[in-house]
Amino acid sequence: MQEIAALITDPAAWVALVTLVVMEVVLGIDNLIFISILTNKLPPESREKARKIGIGLALVMRLGLLGTIAWIVQLTNPLFNAFGHDFSWKDLILIAGGVFLVYKATKEIHHSVDVDDHKEDMVGAGKEVLKMSFAAAIGQILLLDLVFSIDSIITAVGMTPHLPIMIVAVVAAVTVMLVAASPLANFIEKNPTIVMLALAFLLMIGGTLIVEGFGVHVPKGYIYAAMAFSAGVEALNMFSRTARKKKKGSDPTLH
């Protein structure tokens, strides 16, 4: 309690908290995009439940990892050397998560491009496949939650030594994810071109995780700047399409 009281009156602690919350929210964008795309493949009545479960698991996992900070820090210790790089458990987890993201995004892009084949695979499966898909979705969300949670906690440990600040930052970031999950997923579903853009983001994030695992640091600012630029271009395309539709609807000669 004395530590918490001291942190409340410490301006530096508040600065660290705000900075860490912003960092955790930004890092959560990757996780949120994956959850949105994955849950949109489920039946409409199951999507909200899957998002809440997925994000809830992310919160439980991150809070649980905060309770094992000493073990988390050890994940950065070298295990073996290969290709001139000392690999740690963190590196191996990042590489595995990156490979999974690249595989998943590539598979989803294939389904988006080759829709007819994907639909044929689902014919005759009915609700049984949909139920299996729900379980598979939760499993995949849990797997990526683990990767992003470890990255998130290691980042938090590097920014502040105070556990209460980490806990508040993690809870705040996951709360933002929970609030933004449904609006983001609905927006992605209503705009097909956004789906491809989001999948491209996942490919880029997966590639980044892989190279990070091999010791090549990629500044996060570059990644999010590229995402923001691409999103801005797509926003202009959306405005352009909306304007053309309005013009076509108001001009009888264009019908």
Image (tube, rainbow, N blue to C red):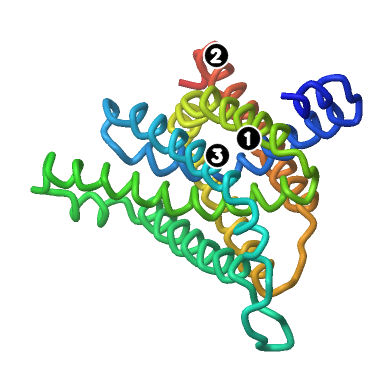
Q: Nearer the viewer, mark 1 or mark 2?
A: 1
Mark closest to the chain's N terminus, 2 or 3: 3
- Assess whether mark 3 and mark 2 are in contact (beta carbons under 8 angstroms): no
Q: Residue at x 19, y 41 (%)?
A: 131
Q: Position of residue 57 (x, y in %)?
A: 44, 39
Q: Position of residue 34 (x, y in %)?
A: 49, 45
Q: Which mark is residue 251?
A: 2
106 left or right, relative to 26: left
Q: Is residue 89 above or below residue 72?
A: below
Q: CA distance from mark 2 to mark 3?
A: 57 Å
Q: Is residue 59 above or below residue 179?
A: below
Mark closest to the chain's N terminus, 3 or 1: 3
Could you tell me which quadrant the N terminus lies in?
top right
Q: Report the residue marked by disc 1.
A: 170
- Assess whether mark 1 and mark 3 are in contact (beta carbons under 8 angstroms): yes
Mark closest to the chain's N terminus, 1 or 2: 1
- Assess whether mark 2 and mark 1 are in contact (beta carbons under 8 angstroms): no
